[in-house]
Image: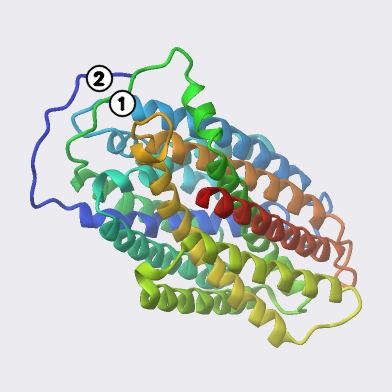
Amino acid sequence: MRIAAPVAVNRPHTLNWLYPLGFLGIGFVDTLFTQWIVYLHAPPGTAHGAGAIGTVLLLSFLLQGLLNPVLGQLSDQLRHRRGRRLPLILFGSLPMALLFYAIWQVKSFGASLLLICLYGVLFVTVVQPYLALLPTIAPDPAQRVRYTLIGGIFSLSAAGAALIAGPWLLEFGSFGIFGLLGALALVMTVFVPALLMHEGPLPDPHPRSGNLFQPMLLAFKHRPLACFLLGNAGVILSIVSLTILAPFLCETLLRQPRAYTSVMNLYAFGGVLAAVAYVGLRGKRLVFLRLLRNLACCVGLLLLGLAIGSFWLEWPLLLWQGGFVAIGALVLVGMMAPNLILAEFAQPEANSAGHSREGVIFGLNGMAISLANALASKTTSGLLGLGKSMTQPLGVQFGLLFAASTALLAVWALSMAGKQKQD
């Protein structure tokens, strides 16, 4: 996948400040997909349960996991006049928008399997290079933090809009409106900005190895990176499981209508805003790895208490609302911190190969996230099948226990990453 080397062009006035806009569309479609795709195919009371759509999601995320590091390695080697990442983003964003629209129009197992798997391939083709683009267009660490913070705010704003408006859109419309709004968001915030951005002069290509997987294996041997990837996957596992559980939680344990999901999501968004204010005030003094670990610990312990207690008690609504505030804070930091931490790992002086490895590093993280999504989707949808009635919501309770345990696993892995990074 080698094209003629580009001619370096100096553009003192570029539109790279558009980079954070992409997180609006990505955050919007990813949130709608994560929270409602299981509900679309298996709402509460469905006779066959959520096992079928869980299998489809498992296959899709496993495919994404396999593609992520390979695509990252290939994009590191790509030489094109538009750069290494932008050609892939431009190639995949329009078909991704079309497939997102189509996913919500069909309910048959065969069609859903095909569409969701194809969408997963294009999601990797667009999102993985988009994340790996950050060190290239923002070489200055301060600028990188600024872009990441703005992108995190945009992403969480879009996610908040999807979480809050989604239930109400369903009350007055159908799932088809999800597809239409998501497709428009991808075109306007990902494809159009990518047309206007510029990667700048590319680094010299690092030597090709005979084995495509050798750079990935070298990166995995970096123990702090491996521990961080495991910890970040644990955080994603917990967040995705909770996102899937939210509509079922409202209708079973909280005994509220489906539309009340938007209210609980609003509390989570309040946690996002609180985290934004905290990060903005602390700025460069923050150690993002430690902050991510501490928030994961807080959420894990809180969920563990709520899950265990729900077998015998009917917790006050205020406690659940407080829990969602803490989850919202974890979501923001969980979106910001990995990009900043991985950008440090990707620098030439930070890896044993001595070359810039943004594609490989971000690809490995994408693989870990995809596998976490696969496990979360399949496990959570399987656990939801345990809840046979509104009076015995065992699936939701065990789903909460699963989310709590994965958050606490993340705490251990992130602690190990911090210790080994210091050593």
Q: Is residue 321 left or right of residue 16?
A: right
Q: Residue at image x 91%, y 78%?
A: 312
Question: Where does the image place residue 345, in percent across and percent down from the top left?
Answer: 43, 44
Q: Secondary structure at mark 1?
A: loop
Q: Residue at image x 35%, y 67%?
A: 284
Question: Where does the image place residue 20, in percent across and percent down from the top left?
Answer: 31, 58
Q: Amino acid at mark 2?
A: Ile
Q: Residue at image x 47%, y 41%?
A: 123
> Residue farthest to the top?
210
Q: Is residue 28 visible?
A: no
Residue 361, image quadrant: top left
Alpha carbon of mark 2 to alpha carbon of mark 1: how far?
7 Å
Number of marks in the rendered image: 2
Disc 1 packing (10 Å; few <14; some 14–19; many ≥20) = many
Q: Is residue 370 left or right of residue 69?
A: right
Q: Nearer the viewer, residue 292 or 256?
A: 292
Q: Is residue 22 above or below residue 102?
A: below
Q: Is residue 195 left or right of residue 375?
A: left
Question: Where does the image place residue 258, in percent across and percent down from the top left?
Answer: 67, 73
Q: Nearer the viewer, residue 110 or 315?
A: 315
Residue 404, image quadrant: bottom right
Return the residue at label 2: 3
Disc 2 packing (10 Å; few <14; some 14–19; many ≥20) = few
> Which label was assigned to residue 94?
none
Q: Is residue 214 visible?
A: yes
Q: Secondary structure at mark 2?
A: loop
Q: Residue at image x 54%, y 68%?
A: 163
Q: Amino acid at mark 1?
A: Leu
- Specify which label sits upstream in the sequence, 2 or 1: 2
Question: Where does the image place residue 272, in percent across and percent down from the top left?
Answer: 49, 73
Q: Is residue 153 above or below residue 120?
A: below
> Which label was assigned to residue 78?
1
